[in-house]
Image (spheres, rainbow, N blue to C red):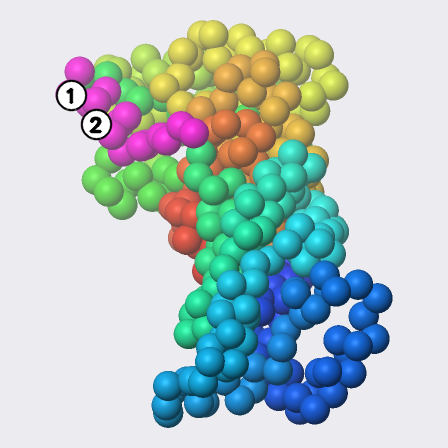
Amino acid sequence: MFEKLKKKLKQVKERIIRKVPAEEVPEAMDETKEAPKEVQSSPTPAVSQTEPEPPSVVQPKLQRARPTKGLRRVVKKISRRELSPEDVEDILWDLQVGLLESDVAVPVADKIIERVKTELIGKKLGLREDPKKLADEVLRKAIEEVLTPEKKLDLIKIIEEKRIRGEPAVLVFVGINGTGKTTTVAKVARYLMGRGYKVVLAAADTFRAAGIEQLETHAERIGAEVVKQRRGADAAAVAYDAIAHAKARGIDVVLVDTAGRMQTEANLMDEMRKIVRVANPDVVVFVGDALTGNDAVEQAKTFDDAVHISGSILCKMDADARGGAALSISQVTGKPILFLGTGQGYEDLVEFKPDIILNALFGD
Ligand SMILES: Nc1nc2c(ncn2[C@@H]2O[C@H](COP(=O)(O)OP(=O)(O)OP(=O)(O)O)[C@@H](O)[C@H]2O)c(=O)[nH]1
Ligand SMILES: [Mg+2]
């Protein structure tokens, strides 16, 4: 997962480490004798102020004995030096390129950059602090921030609240063609069944040939019930039937599978609005294909405009080397990621937590 972005972040981290003054200490060691030459050749005296003086002698001596007055001055200068905007400019540029290459949405990349910049500029690092830890923390924090949505959604809590009222919770799954909706309906159904809930699946993809059969095949495999009508029937009516069935039988959750539709297909977008109007769902799930990167994010926005999505599920994360969709979707839509699809099996569904992405990006 995210191999490319991970590599890029590692490079950026290394560059930050190199820029942090304390880390330059051992590197300057061999140049001790040449240091005065550099000072002489500087055109302005101001340069010598920021120039790292040969601190090699300093660190070991600090540990052994009280430094002399001259050495104390050197120590002070090094530990006081801060990262300037110029210091971090090229690092940030590199990071921006890396994020955009990974298909992170522009406003999200900007937000990450802004955060990293604020954290780095003016940063003072004590001689004993670890620049690697600093670089890691700064990048991790900036990415964690974009992964943490404004709104949270607790699916189990929603289902429990409905159950107490004796009503089924209704989940409608929407998205463009082939993103993984039907598979995800089955995965989520299985996930809920595993937690003791009774579920029914509504075959509301009445549009595409084999839409109904595909859901039935999945349902059979996981042992779930399906409510269906014939192909071409009113999709909203199928959802309505399934909800009525759930109410009559004391079923806890209705999962409505819908046809894939492009945002540009006005009739199908209207049909989706009708399904949502009739079913009045507790949760509208946008199912996106992580491999499509920023397109998935744009789609989520359009579907949110049309039917107010509650959150997203990103499928095919197992094959995603870039990570752009996962990093951008909740920031752009303001809605949380609920699950990640990580394979074609029914068990390949992971509850979303920012740590999953952060560990994939920063883990060893
Ligand atoms: N690798 C991988 N494949 C997935 C994942 N989720 C779904 N798929 C595969 O993606 C393909 C399409 O999945 P469907 O569930 O049929 O997608 P859909 O959105 O219902 O498609 P339409 O109904 O045609 O719009 C299938 O081959 C799935 O096995 C996932 O998380 N990882
Ligand atoms: Mg489908």
| Segment colored magenta | 150-165
* Towards the viewer: 353 or 159: 353
* Residue located at (58% from left, 30% from top): 332
Q: Is residue 98 left or right of residue 240?
A: right
Q: Is residue 125 left or right of residue 198?
A: right
Which mark is on residue 160? Answer: 2
Tell me: residue 131, above or below residue 214.
Answer: below
Which quarter of the rendered picture does the N terminus lie within?
bottom right
The answer to which quarter of the image holds residue 271 is top right
Question: Which x, y percent locates residue 23?
Answer: 56, 75
Q: Amino acid at mark 1?
A: Ile
Question: Which x, y percent locates residue 237?
Answer: 47, 10
The residue beneath circle 1 is: 164
* Residue located at (53% from left, 89% from top): 57
| Type of secondary structure dominating the magenta stretch | helix
* Residue located at (72% from left, 61% from top): 46
> Do the numbered discs 1 and 2 sit on residues whose CB atoms are within 8 Å?
yes
**Residue 223 visible, this orientation:** no
* Towards the viewer: 69 or 81: 69
Is the residue at mark 2 in contact range of ligand 1, meaning its CB lies under 8 Å from it? no
The number of numbered discs placed on residues in the rendered structure image is: 2
Q: Please identify the residue farthest to the front as the structure is shown.
A: 69
For mark 1, give the secondary structure: helix
Question: Which x, y percent locates residue 135?
Answer: 53, 62
